[in-house]
Every structure is written in structure tokens, then in C-alpha cells.
């Protein structure tokens, strides 16, 4: 075999191996989705949305408590996390720029992004749950917001920096004060990107279980009291899935399916908005 | 030494012994520039890349102040005061001295809102007056016929030439005294360029214009006065036809005949 022939063969082997690895990696994703769809759709029915949790064996049991709790927790976390994330990102891009403080905040926020979420849960447990003396929706939402902030902060920072400097200069040249330039011109120019960051941030915390385990805890019944333990899809799913009762396990599959579709939807929407924004 | 014409007519701006140093630079980028800018006429600034013409232009509306650490020295007189003073109200100054950039800078909003932006900043809220002044500005910028039926559309849907005229309309809508043009046609095709040049000439009845250009033919076509800059110095300022036909400085002659540049 000549050197050239050898290289051609090696090339083919590497190509085959890398393609195979890619297929295996993707296959797991579709496998998970496939199982979820099969088991989840099977477990879906209207009762899920009508009834709250019930002891095993009851006909009229559903996930209403967990669905509503999930929506409340995510909404609260969004209300806390989005303004903080966007304003902090605005500081980095428009005021801090290349200062040491700005770089320090960026580095810290990158580290925060990979912080184990259970540690954040433990932190909120110590500073919110312990002093209050009980679990609460507030504590869960704060934990989720802390996870959300660095994601929104970094996307906002990146997206604002993509707005051309000449656009800012043009607004200044018309006699606009700085806050007006940011609000009227820079935010508008980065609208699609910021919205994508927000959606991805929500999607990221939507599937969190660990930080909720000891903050908002869980409840098998419907509640809207923000000062009490609040059920969530993820913790409910965990409890039902490890239970020995088949009807609870069914509900667990339904919860897993609904949660996955919600997060998949958010991710797809975020990407579509970004894509549409880029094409313009 | 530099040959600077003495302008007998009224002047819009007076630059005297002006030096400008960028942050951290050892030497000033503009050295002892002295030049009068005639009122209601067009003054072109020409010279090779890096000669300081854009730096000078951006000093007239203190654009350099957006980036901290730059140093101004000397004087630029406008309406009887030195605008380089630290007490100068930059927001007010920039409503009096407008700017058009090299690339069109349409804001991400509708055509109407783009034109109305500067007026709204000044507190104009009356809807009929806004609409009237937007229409007038668009007519003055020769854009009204093309956009009158789609004022609510996104301004970024316009062509490059239209966007540049939009920027001119936006700048003149606030009725400035001086307009600064920073190579306004270098990103445009020849036909759009012609339109902008025609517009610039029409505007000089109302505003004093300073235009930086890389294109000597453009300077010759549109301007009344031309200043030739080289290595941060103003080498010569004269009536445009005189400067191009009988330049007084050897450097000017060499540049306009293409010996360097």
C-alpha cells in the first residue's frame, strides 16, 4: 500500500467513526423523546388538568396542583430574574464595557452558569427558608431566579454589543442623553436577541428539580399561597416516578411529557426569534 | 507654512490653534489647526487617510467625548463661545450641530419615528405639528415622494441611498445651524451619490455645511471652500476653484495631481 492509499483509508476510517459517534449521540436524544412521547401521550387525559393530587388508587387524581405551581414558580422567577439580568447586562455593555469590574462580573457570571443548581438551592435554604422557618414559593422562585440571571445577563451583554456603535453615535449626534440612546435605539436594535436570552433562561430553569427540593419543597394539593410550600412539575414527577404505585407512575410520565414539550417549545421559539432577527 | 484664506463673509465656526490628542497617544492628531468656516456655504475637507479630517469633523459636535480620555486644546468658536469649554452643554450643542455618518444610521423604528426622534427629544409632542415637520423634513431631503405612503414601515427596509437621505431629513428636522457630513456617499452607488450631492448643495441656504470626503471630484463639485489636511495639519484653505486650479502650497498641488495619497 502506498502512502497516499494509506491516507485515503485512514481518512475513510476516521470519517466512519466520527459519523457513527454523531449518530449514537443523536440517537439518545430521539430515544428519550420517543419513550417520553409513547409513555407520556399514553398517560395524558383531561383529568390531569382538572384534578389535583390524590392518594394512590383514587380515580380523580391529576396534576393541576403541579402545573399551576410550576407556572407560578416560573413566573415569579422570571419577574425577579429578567429585570436584574437585563439591567446587569446593560451595565456591562453600555457602562462597564472593558473595565476591570465589567470583566470580573462577566467571569463570575460564567462561573455561576456552571454552578451546581443544588448548591444554589442550599444557599437559598440557608438565607430564605431557615430565617422564614418554612418552605415557600418565594424561596423556590428566588433559587430559580439566581440560576436564570447569569444566562440573561450574558445574552443581554452579547446582544447589546452587536448593536453597531455608529447607531449609538447617530442618536448622540441628535442630542439624545445616554439613557435615551439605550432605551430607544440600543434596546430596539437588540430586541430579538434579548427576548431569546429570556426564553432560553426560562427554559433553563423550567426543568430544575434540585434547587426546588428544599426551597419550595412540594405539596400534593392545589395552592396559590406564595408563603407556603408549592408543588412543581419536576418535584412532583420525581416523587411520583419513584413511588411503587402504577397510577402515580403514569402521572409521572405525563408530567415528564408536558415539561419536556414546554421546554422544547421555549427553546425552538427562542431560536426562531433569533433566526428571524438575524435575517432582517 | 499653511496658507489659510481670510473669509470676509460671516463665519459659522472659528477654529483657532486647535489641538486634539487621542487617549494615550503621545503626539496630538491635530496640530495647531486654525480655520474659519463660512456661514451658509459648503466647506470640504480633503486629504489622505489618517490626516485628521474626520478627527477635526468629530470635534465640532464633541463626538470624541463619548470615549473618555481624549484631550482638546485651543478654541472652536460657535455662537460667540468656545464649545471646547468643559461647561458646554453637549446635548444642546448637538441639536445645533448635526451629523451625517459614513454608513446610513437608520434607527430600528419606523420612517416617521426616525424623523420625529430628534424633535421628540426636544419635547415636541403635538401630533399635527410633528406630522407637518416630518413631512417638511422628508420633502427637504427629497424623500417624501418615495416614502409618503409607508411612513409606518421599518426604516431599515429602505435602500442605502434612501436611508442616507432619511438620516439627512432626521438631522435637518431639528433645524440645526451646522451640518457635519462624514464621507456621506462612500457607501453609496453613483446615482444615490448624485442625489445626496444635489441635496447638500440645496441645503446650504439654511445651514452651514462641513463635508469630509475621500473623493476630490466630490469636493470640487459641491464645495465653496476646500481645506487640504496632511499629517494633522491644515495645509491650505481656499476657495474651491482656486485650490484645485492654482493651489498655493506645493503639498496641495502634489496631492490633487495624484502624486501621493
Image (cartoon, rainbow, N blue to C red):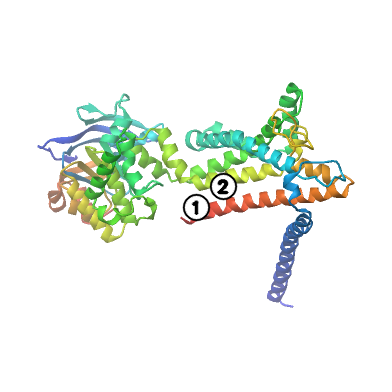
User: Residue A122's image quarter?
Assistant: top right
Q: Secondary structure at mark 1?
A: helix
Question: How far is disc 2 from disc 1 in space, using C-alphas?
Answer: 10 Å
Q: Quadrant of the N terminus of chain A?
A: bottom right
Whether tag 2 and tag 1 are in contact, CB under 8 A, the answer is: yes
Percent x, y for residue A215? 74, 32
Q: Give the left or right position of residue B104, taking residue A257 as reference.
A: left
Q: Which residue is mark 2?
A: A196
Which chain is indicated by disc 2?
Answer: A
Q: Give the left or right position of residue A70, taking residue B17 as reference.
A: right
Percent x, y for residue B111? 34, 49
Q: Nearer the viewer, residue A131 or B19?
A: A131
Q: Residue at x 72, y 73 (%)?
A: A9
Q: How many neighbours does mark 2 have within 10 angstroms: few (below 14), some (14-19), or many (20 or more)?
A: many
Q: Nearer the viewer, residue A101 or B251?
A: A101
- Name the residue furthest bottom: A1
User: Residue B43's image quarter?
Assistant: top left
Amino acid at each position: 500500500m502506498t502512502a497516499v492509499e494509506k491516507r485515503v483509508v485512514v481518512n475513510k476510517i476516521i470519517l466512519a467513526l466520527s459519523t457513527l459517534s454523531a449518530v449514537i449521540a443523536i440517537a439518545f436524544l430521539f430515544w428519550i423523546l420517543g419513550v417520553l412521547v409513547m409513555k407520556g401521550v399514553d398517560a395524558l387525559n383531561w383529568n390531569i388538568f382538572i384534578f389535583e393530587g390524590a392518594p394512590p388508587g383514587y380515580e380523580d387524581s391529576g396534576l393541576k396542583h403541579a402545573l399551576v405551581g410550576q407556572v407560578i414558580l416560573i413566573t415569579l422567577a422570571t419577574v425577579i430574574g429578567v429585570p436584574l439580568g437585563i439591567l446587569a447586562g446593560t451595565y456591562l455593555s453600555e457602562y462597564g464595557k472593558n473595565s476591570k469590574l465589567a470583566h470580573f462580573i462577566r467571569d463570575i457570571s460564567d462561573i455561576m452558569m456552571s454552578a451546581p443548581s443544588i448548591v444554589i438551592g442550599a444557599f437559598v435554604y440557608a438565607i430564605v427558608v431557615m430565617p422564614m422557618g418554612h418552605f415557600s414559593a418565594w424561596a423556590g422562585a428566588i433559587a430559580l431566579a439566581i440560576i436564570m440571571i447569569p444566562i440573561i445577563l450574558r445574552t443581554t451583554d452579547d446582544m447589546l454589543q452587536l448593536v453597531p456603535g455608529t447607531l449609538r453615535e447617530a442618536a448622540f449626534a441628535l442630542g439624545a442623553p445616554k439613557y435615551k440612546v439605550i432605551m430607544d435605539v440600543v434596546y430596539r436594535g437588540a430586541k430579538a436577541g434579548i427576548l431569546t436570552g429570556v426564553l432560553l433562561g426560562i427554559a433553563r430553569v423550567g426543568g430544575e428539580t434540585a434547587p426546588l427540593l428544599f426551597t419550595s419543597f412540594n405539596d400534593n394539593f392545589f395552592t396559590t399561597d406564595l408563603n407556603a410550600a408549592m408543588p412543581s412539575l419536576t418535584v412532583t414527577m420525581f416523587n411520583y416516578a419513584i413511588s411503587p404505585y402504577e397510577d402515580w407512575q403514569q402521572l409521572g410520565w405525563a408530567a415528564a411529557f408536558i415539561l419536556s414539550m414546554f421546554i422544547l417549545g421555549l427553546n425552538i421559539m427562542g431560536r426562531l426569534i433569533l433566526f428571524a432577527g438575524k435575517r432582517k | 507654512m499653511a496658507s489659510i484664506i481670510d473669509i470676509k463673509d460671516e463665519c459659522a465656526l472659528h477654529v483657532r490653534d486647535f489641538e486634539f490628542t487621542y487617549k494615550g497617544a503621545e503626539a496630538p492628531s491635530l496640530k495647531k489647526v486654525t480655520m474659519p468656516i463660512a456661514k451658509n456655504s459648503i466647506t470640504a475637507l480633503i486629504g489622505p487617510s489618517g490626516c485628521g479630517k474626520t478627527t477635526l469633523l468629530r470635534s465640532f459636535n464633541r463626538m470624541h467625548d463619548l470615549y473618555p480620555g481624549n484631550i482638546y486644546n485651543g478654541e472652536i468658536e460657535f455662537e460667540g463661545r468656545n464649545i471646547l469649554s468643559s461647561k458646554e452643554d453637549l446635548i444642546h450643542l448637538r441639536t445645533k450641530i448635526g451629523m451625517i455618518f459614513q454608513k446610513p444610521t437608520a434607527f430600528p423604528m419606523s420612517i416617521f419615528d426616525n424623523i420625529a426622534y430628534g424633535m421628540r427629544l426636544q419635547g415636541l409632542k403635538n401630533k399635527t405639528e410633528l406630522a407637518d415637520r416630518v413631512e417638511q423634513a422628508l420633502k427637504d431631503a427629497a424623500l417624501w415622494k418615495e416614502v409618503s405612503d409607508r411612513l409606518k414601515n421599518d426604516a431599515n427596509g429602505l435602500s442605502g441611498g434612501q436611508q442616507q437621505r432619511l438620516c439627512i431629513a432626521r438631522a435637518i428636522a431639528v433645524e440645526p445651524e451646522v451640518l457635519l457630513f462624514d464621507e456621506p456617499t462612500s457607501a453609496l452607488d453613483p446615482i444615490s451619490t448624485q442625489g445626496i450631492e444635489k441635496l447638500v448643495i440645496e441645503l446650504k441656504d439654511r445651514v452651514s455645511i462641513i463635508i469630509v470626503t475621500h473623493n476630490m471630484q466630490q469636493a470640487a463639485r459641491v464645495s465653496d471652500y476646500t481645506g487640504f489636511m496632511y499629517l494633522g495639519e491644515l495645509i491650505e484653505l481656499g476657495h474651491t476653484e482656486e485650490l484645485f486650479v492654482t493651489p498655493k502650497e506645493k503639498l496641495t498641488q502634489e496631492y490633487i495631481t495624484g502624486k501621493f495619497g
